[in-house]
Amino acid sequence: MMTNDEAQTHQILDPVQQRKGRMIFLLLAIFFTVPLLVVVAMIKFEWRPSGKSYGQLIQPPVSIAHARNWVNDNQQALPMFWQDKWNMVLIARECDAGCMQRLYDLRQIYVSMYKDMVRVQRVLITQQADTSPIRARYPDLLIINGQSEQVAELGRMLSGGGQNTLDAHRVYFIDPLGNIMMQYGPGMEAKWIRKDLVKLLKASWAG
């Protein structure tokens, strides 16, 4: 007859339970890893979801994962603000009337996502020091305005020799790994930006 200790040891070493535990661990690893690998593959192989895309694919891909000095308008360090979300990002030197209109567009897109709202966040990256007028209209907007030189460097990276991104009122999609995937000029209607976002969310369950 086995003692209690022997029975516990037998239970711990039960190969069936061990296999079941390993299988659960493997499934969890696949569930959390595969979506991110899909995102990387989409960028590396220039793959787009089926159907027409309205935005311009960023080529070569630009990653902000190496830049960690992001600070929000409350002086809170957010080194990886893009993580775990799909990000609709507006980059502007100063948020003038055109910028405010674009922020309104992004808010309308965001609220129209319904159950997928939790997978998306809106971000303004700007050099504007006083963000109180923006904050008054969009209290749930993530505003990155610390480290002005890093914002300027991002603008140079994305300008590609053309108009400086800080003055262009472009919208960008940044994936949960910090890769800048798509861009939209100021003339692009919000409904087309939304269509691309819906396709991205369907193609990947990351975020």
Image (spheres, rainbow, N blue to C red):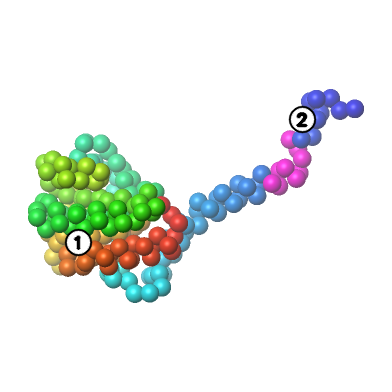
Q: Nearer the viewer, residue 22 or 116?
A: 116
Three-letter amino acid code at the position of disc 2:
Gln
Residue at numbered disc 2? 8
Q: Position of residue 107 (x, y in %)?
A: 24, 53
Residue at left 43%, top 62%? 202
Toward the right, the furthest residue is: 1
Q: Is residue 177 left or right of residue 70?
A: right
Q: Earlier in the sequence, mark 1 or mark 2?
A: 2
Q: Nearer the viewer, residue 43 or 200?
A: 200
Q: Is residue 3 above or below residue 97?
A: above
Q: Does the rendering let one see residue 61? A: no
Toward the left, the furthest residue is: 96
Q: Residues within 10 Å of mark 2 (few under 14, many from 20)?
A: few
Query: Mark 1 falls on what kind of element?
Result: loop
Q: Nearer the viewer, residue 52 or 176?
A: 52
Residue 125 highlighted magenta (yes or no) = no
Residue at left 59%, top 51%? 27
Mark number for residue 129? none
Tell me the magenta residue range.
12-20
Q: Is residue 6 above or below residue 65?
A: above
Residue at numbered disc 1? 170
Q: Does the rendering let one see residue 116? A: yes
Residue 19 highlighted magenta (yes or no) = yes
